Structures are given as structure tokens and as C-alpha cells.
Amino acid sequence: MELAAICDPVLIGEGPHWDEKQQCLYFVSVLEGSLHKYVPVTGEKTKTNIDGRVGFIVPVDGAVDQFVIGVGRTFQRVEWNGSEGSEVKVVEVIGDVDQGVAAPTAINDGKADPRGRLFGGTMNVNWENSPHRHGSLYRIDNNNIYKLCDNIQLSNGLAWDLREKAMYYTDSTERKIRRYDYDVDTGDISNKQFIFDFEKNHIGGMPDGITIDSDGNLWIAVFNGSCVIKIDPRSGKLLQKIPIPAKQVTSVIFGGQHYDVLFVTSARLRAGGPQCGCTFTITGLGVKGLPGYKYKIV
């Protein structure tokens, strides 16, 4: 196994997505409001800024240089050609969420599901100092927005397993991993269960972004835990713990030509260390991930 830092530190790296067609990694820096692109074959790294806090980036299926992003409380479809400092054009405002919520919330993470619907959640902006749970999890289906659950404090990782008919999800401050029964035809979720408990497994920190490998095991970024963990969601067993030279590990995604590279984002909020906030690659894990899904406009 080999770990390497591939991108310069950002304040909060988040929302990584591997684009199979372009063979590149996209991710965001939340508080800096920046979109990032990394091409492993050439080593090229580019970024640009938008106006506002950004939670994730997901390419749009069938479109060139188009993405869905979460900005503040708004889901937007934008166009960015991937070049350094180039303009990000808002193609469409899909809609606002958390309407009527007085407390400050913002979109924090999002992914497309196997049918190209977008799932994205919100968080209490002041989650560290507030016990309240004003966030929610939403589904966007053909630009229609549906609330799936509320009472969320810090919405984070999402992953789907069609063989298990399962969706996995994290509200980070629970320090547990949720499993829902998932209907791929409708996008509906039901029957919430907790399948892994950080406290019971003596894992410090809290779960952040997650991804799934071809064996159905979950890889979980551990914020304030300086590691990525691998668990079997069917048995609830901890399978592996990989140290990361950054305390605040934020998200993970498999990519590369054969999906055998794990990309890991991190943050440097009040965290010391020269590699805090870097994006890393981990190779030699002996597993492969699954292609990410793009947002589909029907």
C-alpha cells in the first residue's frame, strides 16, 4: 500500500467525484468556494472560484462541462470548462431547500444514485456549537425536490448497493452509519437501521464521506480521526484502518483507469501539519471501487 499527497492544501476538501470519461478527479473546497480538477496522467491541477459556499460537484450525464453543485441552500446546474480560473456559468437554478428554517444551514454533500437522481443533504453551519438538528436529506428527481428525512445535524456520505437493495448514509454527529432499504425504481428509502457504531468500535472522530467497493464493503473518511476505515456493512465488522497524515479526513472515492486508486480529501480547520487539507491517493489496497453516477436530466 502506498499513500501520496497529490494536491495542495485547501481549507475543506470535499465531494470528490471520479469522471470516467475524462479520467480526472473533481472535488470542491467548501468555505473557499472553489471547484478543483486533477488529471492523474498529466498531473495537471486546475481550479476556479464561485460566489458562495459549495458542498459538492457531480457531472451531468450527456452534457459537456456541466455539473450539479450545492451552493449555500441552492442546487444549481453550472458550466465550467475545467481550465484554471475560468468562469463558472449558472445554467439553471434547480431549487432552494430548507425553506422556512431560521437557523443557518447549508448543503454539505451530494451524489447521484444508480438512476441518476441526486441525493444531497444540509447541515447546521454552526454544528460544533449547536445541538440542534435543522438539516434534512433531499432527493432531486428530474429537477423535482423531495425531502426524505429531517432532524439532521451534519449530512454527509452516501453510497448504494444494488445487490443488497441498500443505501448507506451518515449524519456525522450521530457517530454511526445508517442503512436504508432502497428502491432503485422510485428512489424511495425506508427502514432506517444503524449498522456500525463508532463508539462501540472504539473509533475516534466521526464518519464523514463514504464510498463502496466492488465487494460491497464501505470505506469511510474519519473526520478528526486521522484515518480511513473499511467496514463490512452486512456484518458490522471493522475490517481495516488506514492512517492518513491529516487529522480531518473528509471524503473518499475510488477512481483511476481500473478503479483501484482511493482518492482521499481532507481539511485544515484549526489543524496543524503540512499535509492537512491535502488530497491523497492510496494505491495497492487490493480492491476495486465502482464507477460513480452522473446526474440525469430526463
Image: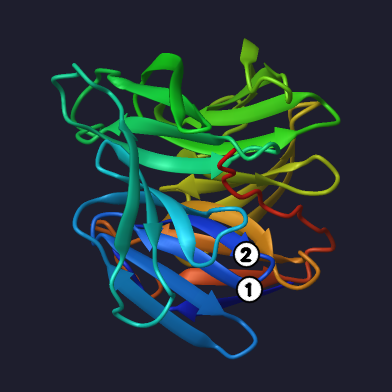
At 65% from the left edge and 18% from the top edge, which residue is drawn? 180
Q: Nearer the viewer, residue 188 or 79?
A: 79
Looking at the picture, the colour scheme in use is rainbow
> In the rendered structure, which amino acid carries the disc numbered 2?
Asp
Q: Is residue 134 above or below residue 222?
A: above
Q: Residue furthest bottom?
A: 42
Q: Is residue 266 left or right of residue 293?
A: left
Please give the residue where the numbered disc 2 appears in the rendered image: 19
At 76% from the left edge and 73% from the top edge, which residue is drawn? 257
Q: Is residue 24 above or below residue 204?
A: below
Look at the image and tell me in which quarter the C terminus lies: top right
Q: How many marks?
A: 2
Q: Secondary structure at mark 1?
A: loop
User: Where's residue 110, x and y in %?
Assistant: 48, 41
Q: Residue furthest left?
A: 102
Please give the residue where the numbered disc 1 appears in the rendered image: 22
Q: Examine the rendering and report whether any part of residue 277 can be seen.
A: no
> Label 2 vs label 1: CA separation?
6 Å
At 45% from the left edge and 35% from the top edge, which residue is drawn? 120
Quick check: marks 2 and 1 in contact, CB under 8 Å? yes
Q: Is residue 87 above or below residue 74?
A: below
User: Where's residue 294, x and y in %?
Assistant: 61, 50
Q: Is residue 26 above or below residue 203?
A: below
